[in-house]
Amino acid sequence: MLSPRILTLGLLALSVPCAAQATWTQLTPTSPPNGRAGTSAVYDGVGLLFFSGNLGPSGVPSQFPSELWRFDGTTWTQLNPTPDPVNGIPDGRQWYAGAFDFARGVYVIFGGQKGSGLSNLLGDTWEYNVATNAWSLKTPSTSPSARRWTAMSYHAPSGKCVMFGGETANSGTYSNETWTWDGTNWAQLSPTTSPSARGRGKMAYDLFNQEILYSGGRNASTAISVETWAWDGTNWSQKANGPARYAHAIAYDLARKRYVLYGGAPTYDETWEYDRASDTWTQRYPQWASTGIWRTVPAMVYVPTLGKTILFGGFGAPQGMSQTQQNDTWEYQTNALAAFTSVGSGCATSAGVPNLTATALPWIGESLTMEVSNVPATGATFCVIGSAPLTISLGSIGIGPASCVVLVNPTFTIGMPVSVTTGRPTLSLPVPASPALIGGSLLNQALIVDFGTGRSYVSNRGDAVFGAL
C-alpha cells in the first residue's frame, strides 16, 4: 500500500498534451448592446443580466437608457419587461447596486445616478421578476439614503441581499453602512467589525464558503483601497490585501473556486485571482496582456451554465487611444477544466450504499480530495486507484457479495483515514504542478472491509480528470 506522496510521483508517469491556464477569449455575438459602463450585472439562472448603464457622454440624461439585456453565452437579447402597474419602469442609471435573489427569482437594483452631480442620486428599490418578466417598484418602510458606487450581493444562507458602502447625497460623504434586503424591507446592521467608509468596491458571493467578498474601493480623499473583506452573514473580517483598485469588476468562478478581478482605475487592464483557501491574490495577466483594453465599471459575472466568466463593455480604451464606452463581449476560463465523474454504483453495506465524491477537484499544483459516505463503523476503507477500467465481482473471488463490482484495474491502493471533521473516510492526493498531467485521468473506487460481517464492499467509481487553473 502506497502513501499519497509516492502516488504523486506515480502521476508524473502520465503523458498527455499540455494546455494553458485560464485565458480571455473575445466573442462575436450579433447585435450586442451599445457600448456602456456603470452597470451592475448578475447571473439570473440563464446568463449575464444587466440594466441600463451610461452610454456617454457623461452627464447627458438621454444616455442612461432604461434597457434590460441578457447574454446567454451565444446571443444578446434586449428584454421587454412588463412595467410596474403604477410606476412604470425604473429610470435609466449608472453606478447602482444590483444582486440576484435566487430564492425569489428576482433581480434587485438600488439607487445609482441618473444624471450628473450628487443631486441626481437615487434611493429607490426595484425588482425584476424573471418568471413573470415584470418590473415592480418596492415601497419599504425603512430604506438606505440615496447613493451611488455602493455594492450588493445575494447571501444564500440568510436569504437576503447584502449592500455595503457607497457615496451618499450628503455632500459626497462616503458610507460604511451594511444593509440587508429581504424582499419587503431594508434593515441596517451593526457588525462589530466593518470596513471603513468607501465606495466603488465590488462584491461577489462564494457558494462554497457561503460568504461575500468585497474588494477594493476608494474613500472621500480618493485614496485607493487594497483591502479585501469577507461577510459571513453576521460580521466582516479582513483578508489578504489585493491589488489597489476601484471601479473594477469581480466574479466568483465556481468551477475553479477562485475570485476573478478585472480592470478598474487607475487605468488597468490586469487580471487577478483570489484563492480563499490560501487567502492569497495572484496576478494572472499584466496590463495589455489579457483583453488589450483597460476599462472601468464593466459588466462581469460567472455564468455556471456556461462554466465561464463573462465580461461586457466598460469605459476605457485600447492602449494609446481615446477613452469611450466599449461594447465587446469576452469569456474567461481555462481550456482544461478539472473534473470528477461518478461511474456505476456501489453495493449496500449495513450503513447503506457507499458513495465516493470529490470535495476538491484535481487541479495541477493542488490536491484531489475524496470522501466516502455510508461506511460502517466497524471496518477499514481503502482507495483503489488505477488508469484503466475493470469489471470483476467480489463474489467471484469470495470476499464480498456478487453485486459488488470492482470497476478499477488497481495500480495503487491507499488507506483512507477517517476525517475528524466529517467522520467519513477521506483521502487527499497532491497533484504535481506538471503540465504533462493536464487532461489525463485517474480512476478511483473505495473498497470497504467490514470487520463486523467479514465481507468487503465497494463504492461507485470516480473518474478524475486533471485540469489547469
Image: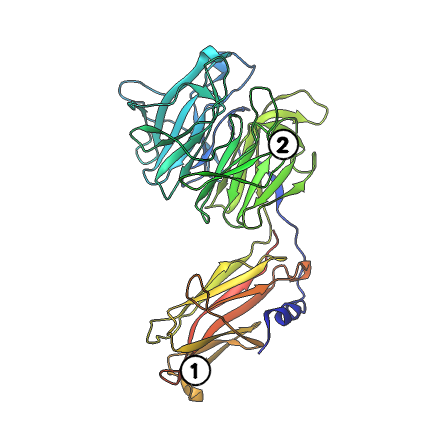
The image quadrant of residue 433 is bottom right
The image quadrant of residue 323 is top right
Crowd class of label 2 (few under 14; some 14 to 19; many from 20; radius 10 Å)? some
* Residue 16 locus on image (x, y percent): 66, 63
Residue at image position (40%, 25%) is 110
* Residue 422 locus on image (x, y percent): 42, 62
Amino acid type indicated by mark 1: Ser
For the N terminus, the quadrant is bottom right
Looking at the image, the residue that sits furthest to the left is 85
**Cα–Cα gap, marks 2 and 1:** 59 Å
Residue at image position (43%, 82%) is 393
463, above or below 260, in the image:
below
Which badge, 2 or 1, comes first in the chain's sequence?
A: 2
Q: Is residue 123 visible?
A: yes
Residue at image position (38%, 34%) is 161
Mark 2 vs mark 1: give the one in front: 2
Q: Which mark is residue 101?
A: none
334, above or below 425, in the image:
above
Q: Which residue is mark 2?
A: 244
Q: Is residue 255 left or right of residue 180?
A: right
187, above or below 252, in the image:
above
Amino acid type indicated by mark 2: Ala
Q: Which residue is mark 1?
A: 393
* Residue 413 locus on image (x, y percent): 55, 76
